[in-house]
Image (spheres, helix red, strand yellow):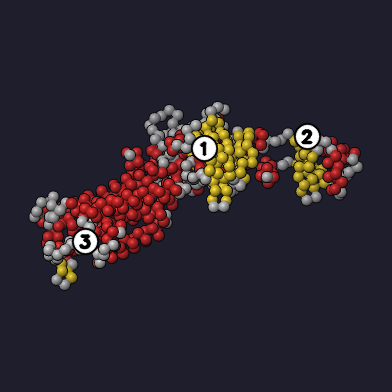
Amino acid sequence: MGDTILEINHLSKKYKDVKAVDNLNLKIESQMVYGLLGPNGSGKTTTLGMLLGVIRPTEGDFSWFGNGQADVNRMKIGALLETPNFYPYLTAEQNLELVAKIKDIDLNAGGDSKSIDDILKLVGLSDRRKSKFSTYSLGMKQRLAIGSALLGNPEVLVLDEPTNGLDPQGIAEIRDLIIEIGKTDKTIIIASHILDEIEKVCTHCAILRKGKLLQTGTIKDIIGNQDVTLIKLASNDIDALKKAIDQMDKVSIYKEVENEIIIRTESGTKTSDINQLFFDKGIVLSALNMFNESLENQFLEIVGKS
Amino acid sequence: MMKLIGIEWLKLKRLTTLKVILLIYMVLVPTMYFLLSYIEVGPIRIPDEGYQFPDTYQLVTWTASWMNLMVGVIIIVFATNELKYKTQRQNVIDGLNKKEVIFSKFLVIIGLALFVTLYTFLVGLVVGFYNGIGSPLDGIEFIGVYFISTLGYFSFAFFFANLIRLPALAIVIYIFSTIIESIVGWIAVQEYVQFSPLTTFAQLSPFPMHFWVAEGLPNPLLMTTMEGSLLAMFYVTLFMVSSYWIIKRRDV
């Protein structure tokens, strides 16, 4: 990690009486693969829209590359925001040519900068490079948008729901591509509501809900919280069971589901240890299972708690 | 500026609407101009002077100014496309600023006005030469004035496109307001209507009434051509600045 690529201070966007983004503070350093995670309507796209100069912030400010909000900053950013936006009557090649012109990309420069042909090959659109954008399927449009973001080898990539509309194979390809790029010296910012995606490709992550920042940190801190073991219990006398748990040191209630209780214990705890523990307290368990909380549920847990 | 021209040219050169409408304009202007000579309303018909210098320029620009409304539709389609396909938004994401977005469209408007004006000039020039009387430089000021009037219509169309954003509605309102204002302004040259933008543009290419009305009669127009041109330029600026203001305030 190194220089600060992006700094966001007290950024807010208000639509009438709805606060789409509420006092957001973030700092993103170079070479991070930063995930913005949140359910639909949590303000991810609005945040990126402000960072990309298309939505006017109500309050607060941000700075790219330590250079404030200057329009030229965006030429160094490859971005896909919300939907793939291209001229439907132009082909993939012509559309990319146009983007290159806007971004002052010299297509004949060689070096790290990929040519339009290379880009189209990379995102699997070589065969259709002469087809009009209007004839593309949703997945192809999305690929072209990702290709367009990669054009000119930008320092920073901003990808809003990059695997939206892709089939499983396409999703895997794009994720691998992002992981590959993340290994170079690029900085990547990804917004997604799919935790699995963030977990697979990101190094850092911020969780948003209703425009508010809930948590930030490395992926490991936030969702790699696997140093506890979860165990699901049930007993005929739930109240006695709860009471017993309250008295124990190394066990606490993680979640109650109908007539069952999920407890949190030190990692490596075996069900037999737990059975013994409760048996000693005179409680007979009617169910006792290891419980694997999916990452998705952990995420919902974080989002639901606040 | 060359960069912006290059960008807009890439967008325009494959736009079917542009090709079709310009083709229709290029066919209709000489055709209508030619057919006018056959129209007789009682004793009134276009005299031969209408096809000789200097009146050829005035008659051809008056004819063309009606077709010009149609060319304004290109601007509306082009501008609302950018909103509909969110490509204007993408242009900004890719690094253009909002001033460049407006300025590049202004360049398109100037380019289109230049093309239309030059073509109309050629039609007048060829017909004038064919009928062989007078100097081709006589009456050429009508061409310059026609350029300003064209700029006016196109910037008006652009302003409507940005204000209304829906292509169909913008086109309907544009055509109706233009035609109604032109007719009102032409039939009854009123004291105040003449200062309204569309009437100002329309009056820059007036029908050559002097074919029938003796020159001794008072000019029904209160504004001279020079004043009209200045007012038209003022409106062009107003529409472009207002369009910028709309885009600047809006989230694109």
Q: Residue at x 78, y 37 (%)?
A: A265
Name the residue tied to disc 1.
A62
Q: Chain of mark 3?
A: B
Q: In which quadrant will I find the N terminus of chain B?
A: top left
| Residue bearing the label numbered 3 | B221
Task: List x then y, in percent, for residue B78.
Answer: 37, 51
Q: Is residue A181 visible?
A: no
Dot 1 lies on which element?
A: strand
Apparent side of residue A219 relative to residue B147 in the rendered image (left or right): right
Amino acid type of the residue tagged 2 in the rendering: Glu
Q: Residue at x 68, y 45 (%)?
A: A306
Tag shown at residue B73 = none
Where does the image place residue B131, in percent across and percent down from the top left? 10, 56
Q: Is residue A142 above or below residue B186?
A: above
Left or right of A23 in this view: B3: left
Quick one: A73 or A275, which is closer to the camera?
Answer: A73
Secondary structure state at the residue bearing disc 3? loop
